[in-house]
Image (spheres, rainbow, N blue to C red):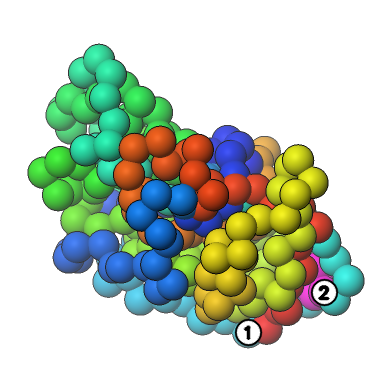
Amino acid sequence: MRPCLVVVALLLTATAGCGTDEPSPAPSPSPSPSPSESRSPSPSADVTGAPTVARTTTAARKGGPGTEWEITVYYTAVEDFHDGADTEVTGCTRLECKDGQDDLGSYPADFVEAVRDEGTGRTSSGQYLNWSYDVGFWLDSAPRTSDGQRLTPFFSAAADPDVLPQGTRFRITGCGVQDDGSAPQEAVCAALRDGAWTVTDEFTPGLGGSHHLDAYIGPETGENFTDSDWYVTLTGARLTIG
């Protein structure tokens, strides 16, 4: 989740459950332009993936009008776009375990690294290799949050639960600037603004921060995705919460 990828940047996270193919992104990133290792789980999964909706709380108001946010995108890595030495992965064949030692297969080294950073990856076989701080690696039929909810592009987000609890809805009203001070590409900013975001996940302990969000944008769309316009971290962004 950089502070959820352990750092990366914005637009473009997992369980054994039931599910089908990953949903298509709601505004679709362009094929060539596009983290965040940031999930802290407590594996008691709602494997149906039904989003939790909660009322905005006082804690959420800590990030009210006038607050500037840092927003980092995270995405589903795609094995077919990666290479490197085969790396054996062990873990759980379903989410309802922790630090499993089952053989989950061998995958390109940089794909495994991307799954650790982003929290989820689609294998060449069509399964999803997911990762979270408390569970480790596990195989699933869909990209999921650490507690079993299905990740949905331009909907799912991760935040500090003391500021924006799970179920908090928000809109991105201003994209701020990139790390180098430049404005993000307009198509990227527009897609983020159009998203109907809900906090469905939280950061790995020690990552993120009270005014940091990770926004899920779906699967990467090609090789060198992290060099594209979609892989961004924004600072000085503005939100409307609730």
Q: CA distance from mark 1 to mark 2?
A: 15 Å
Question: What span is colored magenta in the figure?
Answer: 60-64
**The quadrant where residue 8 appears:** top right
**Residue 73 vertical position relative to residue 80 in the rendered view, above or below:** below
> What amino acid type is highlighted by mark number 2?
Gly
Q: Which mark is residue 81?
A: none
Query: In this rendering, does residue 102 appear at all?
Result: no
Specify whether residue 97 is painted magenta.
no
36 left or right of 148 in image: right
Which residue lies under the disc numbered 2? 64
**The quadrant where residue 102 appears:** top left
Percent across and percent down for residue 60 are: 74, 72
Residue at 66% in and 56% down:
184
Q: Nearer the viewer, residue 230 or 128?
A: 230
**Residue 81 vertical position relative to residue 53 in the rendered view, above or below:** above
Percent across and percent down for residue 207 are: 65, 41
> What amino acid type is highlighted by mark number 1?
Arg
- Extreme residue in the right direction: 66
Residue at 14% in and 49% down:
126
Which residue lies under the disc numbered 1? 55
238 left or right of 227 in image: right
Label 2: state its secondary structure.
loop
Q: Could you tell me how many numbered marks the image carries? A: 2
Residue at 61% in and 58% down:
185
* Marks 1, 2: nearer the viewer: 2
**The quadrant where residue 47 appears:** bottom left
